[in-house]
Image: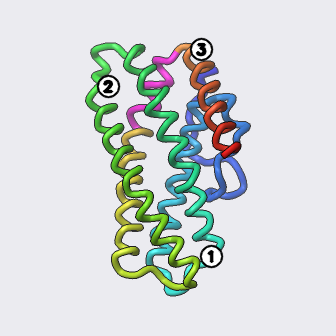
Amino acid sequence: MKNHLSNTRRGDSEQDPTDLDLLQDPLEFIHEDHMHMRAICELMEQISHSSLPDPVEISRLLRFLDHEIGLLIHDEDDELQGMLLVRCTPEDDIGPTLERLKAEHQTLSELCPRLRTVLTEMHDDKRAAKDDGAAALRDFADRLRRHLIVENAIVLPIAQARLTDDDIVRLRSAMIRRRIEDMQV
């Protein structure tokens, strides 16, 4: 079950949501979602500088903010972190890193409503971002990129090494359940 995490993203587009078929291996799904988020950060920066942003691209960012990022934050905070705290050894010293990541998740979540407003106004008014909105988009992208570096370099490799097959099954089930619930909203 434990595969090596690749450095390339599967699928046709880096900006498309992560393929749900990848939930068979939830750690690989999370890694793929991180790769997707890196592409979303690039798109946010492009849109923040664009004089006439593409409404389809703005809609893609709104979908990301409305559905994708929240699901992954819950996957990591509600399941993965708890499993790691149980499975990791004292030498792993994962607790402080997980606390930092959870605080960053909170900050990112708190920034999402402002970004939704900025993007919705840009979309509805068919205009570029105002200076403060453009700065908010770039700030979010920068924060998310830095956050993903820690998750990819520390958390996912430790999860690969420490989680049991039963943990992987529980993580997969929770992630699938969460996405089914999101689809029903």
Please report the bounds of the magenta region as a residue range: 153-163
Give the residue at mark 3.
165
Going by the numbered disc 1, the residue's amino acid type is Pro
Looking at the image, is mark 3 or mark 1 nearer the viewer? 1
Give me the residue at 40% from left, 53% from top. Answer: 144
Q: Could you classify mark 2 by the number of other residues whose Cα lies within 10 Å: few (under 14), some (14-19), or many (20 or more)?
A: some
Please state the horizontal and vertical placement of residue 173, each as a whole percent of the image. 64, 24
The amino acid at mark 3 is Asp
The amino acid sitting under disc 2 is Ile
Q: CA distance from mark 3 to mark 1?
A: 43 Å
Secondary structure found at label 2: loop
Number of the label disc, if any, that sits on residue 123: none
Say which quarter of the image contains residue 184.
top right
Other-residue count near label 3 (Cα within 10 Å), few / some / many at <14 / 14–19 / ≥20: few
Residue matched to label 2? 94
The question of residue 45 being in magenta is answered with no
Write down the quadrant of residue 139 in the picture: bottom left
- Label 2 and label 3: CA atoms lie apart by 20 Å
Relative to the observer, which residue lies in front, 30 or 7?
A: 30
In percent of width and height, residue 14 lies at 62, 56
Secondary structure of residue under mark 3: helix
The residue under the point 59% across, 14% down is 165
Residue 43 in the image, given as x and y percentages of width and height: 53, 67
> How busy is the neighbourhood of tag 1: few (under 14 within 10 Å), some, or many (20 plus)?
some
* Residues at circles 2 and 3 in contact by the CB criterion of under 8 Å: no
Q: Residue at x 62, y 48 (%)?
A: 9
Quarter-of-image position of residue 82: top left
